[in-house]
Amino acid sequence: MSEACEIPAPFENLHGALWFACNYTHGTLPSTPLARMSGGNPEGRGLGGLNGAGQAGMILAEVDQLDPLRRNVIRARFTRRGVPCACKASCCSGERKNPEWVQAIERLTEDSLQALSGCAAHYKLRRAMVEKYFGARVILGDAALACGVNRDTASNHNGRVTGLLREAEKLGMYEIEGRLKRAGVID
């Protein structure tokens, strides 16, 4: 009687797989302290080089099969906002915005109009709401003031945009988890 040899999935959880894939492509995947001490990367179970690039590509191909709103929510959630910058300009902080994160935020800013149908919604205010949802340091009251919008109106709009993004994220995560389990990428 022989037992089937089971190959472990490359990732233990969904968040690890998505973080790895969304940040591997530009070499922005930070090394964890444990990985530096042990000389490996336990999150991706040792994936590096072409194997890592291939695994990241397969995961992102699954993400790209999602509805555009869900895809962009996942990309905005798991892609680093900033990437290292070595321009050495006096005004540089050593980090610049990640173009993939910016692109996802721009698309979600347009998609946020779905939650605000029938309302005149200022682009910069919607952008601030979307960035705030994904953890950027945004003071909504300041953004409302800069756009000439009443704070209460901005707060109401923020609740609607947040609801749209939260629902899209919940459904997107559920869908991508199923896809990655079927593909054998996560346990």
Image (cartoon, rainbow, N blue to C red):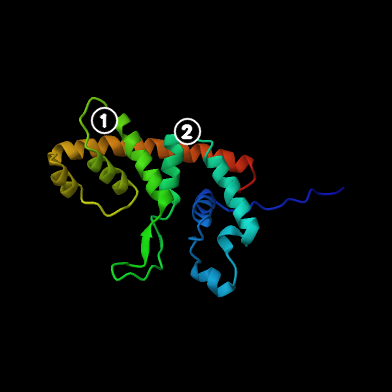
- At a point 67% along the width and 53% down the height, the residue shown is 8
Query: Tag 2, which secondary structure?
Result: loop
Per the image, the residue denoted by label 2 is 67
Sequence order check, earlier mark of 2 and 1 = 2
- At a point 20% along the width and 30% down the height, the residue shown is 120
Residue 65 in the image: state x and y as whole percent: 54, 36
Q: CA distance from mark 2 to mark 1?
A: 20 Å
Residue 100 in the image: state x and y as whole percent: 43, 49
Mark on residue 116?
1
Q: Considering only vertical position in the picture, is 77 above or below 108? A: below
Residue type highlighted by circle 1: Leu
The answer to whether residue 134 is left or right of residue 150 is right
Q: Considering only vertical position in the picture, is 176 above or below 30? A: above
The answer to whether residue 51 is left or right of residue 105 is right
- Asked whether 62 or 26 is in front, the reply is 26
Q: Considering only vertical position in the picture, is 83 above or below 129? A: below
Residue 168 in the image: state x and y as whole percent: 40, 36
Residue type highlighted by circle 2: Asp
Direction right: furthest residue: 1
Q: Quadrant of residue 82?
A: bottom left
Residue 97 in the image: state x and y as whole percent: 37, 56
Q: Considering only vertical position in the picture, is 159 above or below 82? A: above
- At a point 55% along the width and 74% down the height, the residue shown is 37
- Asked whether 126 or 159 is in front, the reply is 126
Query: Tag 1, which secondary structure?
Result: helix
Number of residues whose C-alpha sits closer than 10 Å to that of mark 2, classed few (under 14), some (14–19) or many (20 or more): few
- Asked whether 63 or 50 is in front, the reply is 50
- At a point 52% along the width and 41% down the height, the residue shown is 63
Q: Quadrant of residue 95?
A: bottom left
Direction bottom: furthest residue: 37
> Looking at the image, do the residues carrying marks 2 and 1 touch, with CB atoms under 8 Å apart?
no
